Image (cartoon, rainbow, N blue to C red):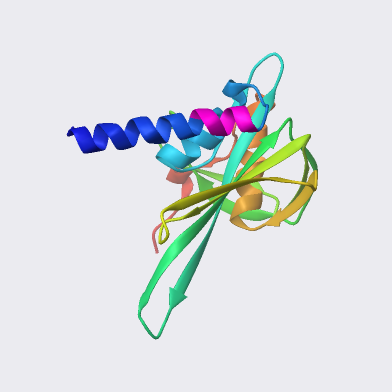
Amino acid sequence: MNIKELNEMITFTNAEKRLVSDYNIPADAFLPLLLSLRTGGDWSYSSENIKTISVMDKTTIYDHKNKSGYSLEEIYLFINPVLKCGEGTVHRLEKCGDEEIRLLVRRPYRVKVVSERVIKATVNPFERQIKTEELHGKELTFDGSTAYDISHEIEHLEQKEIKGESLWGFKFI
């Protein structure tokens, strides 16, 4: 690692520390959001006092004329979330943690999640900026991939085992 990279890493880490203090939320509650930023994916965290999840909603912005674009990421950090309701059923393959293979699971197509607080980080790789804001709504509705991810992470908070059918039951045709 060179000096420039080390300085950038220190600057970024200090910005993360300021972010955490700006929202007056326990530092460990921010772990899912910080993990989503650094490594990608969705994360959950639970302690005696707080439960948090982060989920990522990606949108590709593409200019067909210039044949160029980027993937905008909206990462939602939910503080003490509760899945209020879900509707529909989607069959999908999921792999989680130490699982060796993916499992066929059933998830709701649309979910309504209620949370004490919601912090949204919008990551724009084209502009190399991360905008954070606290959302005023405590109840949000998501559908599609983000809904499945919320359902999955809340299962972790509830310490439920992710159950499904093995990929080995699939048949090639």
Q: From the viewer's perspective, is residue 121 above or below residue 155?
A: below
**Horizontally, is 65 left or right of 17 in the view?**
left
Give x and y (percent) for residue 141.
75, 53
Q: Nearer the viewer, residue 125 or 140?
A: 125
Pick the residue in front: 51 or 95. Answer: 51
Give the side of residue 8 with respect to residue 170, left or right: left
Which segment did they paint magenta?
Answer: 17-22
Instruction: Tell me: residue 110, above or below residue 30.
Output: below
* Residue 94: x %, y % from top left: 51, 44
Look at 60% across and 35% down and name the residue there. 163
Please give the count of numbered marks on the rendered protein. Answer: 0
**Can see residue 66?**
yes
Q: Nearer the viewer, residue 17 or 65?
A: 17
Which residue is located at x 74 percent, y 57 percent? 88
Prevalent SS, magenta region: helix
Figure quadrant of residue 44: top right
* In the image: residue 135, left or right of residue 77: right
Quarter of the picture holding the C terminus:
bottom left
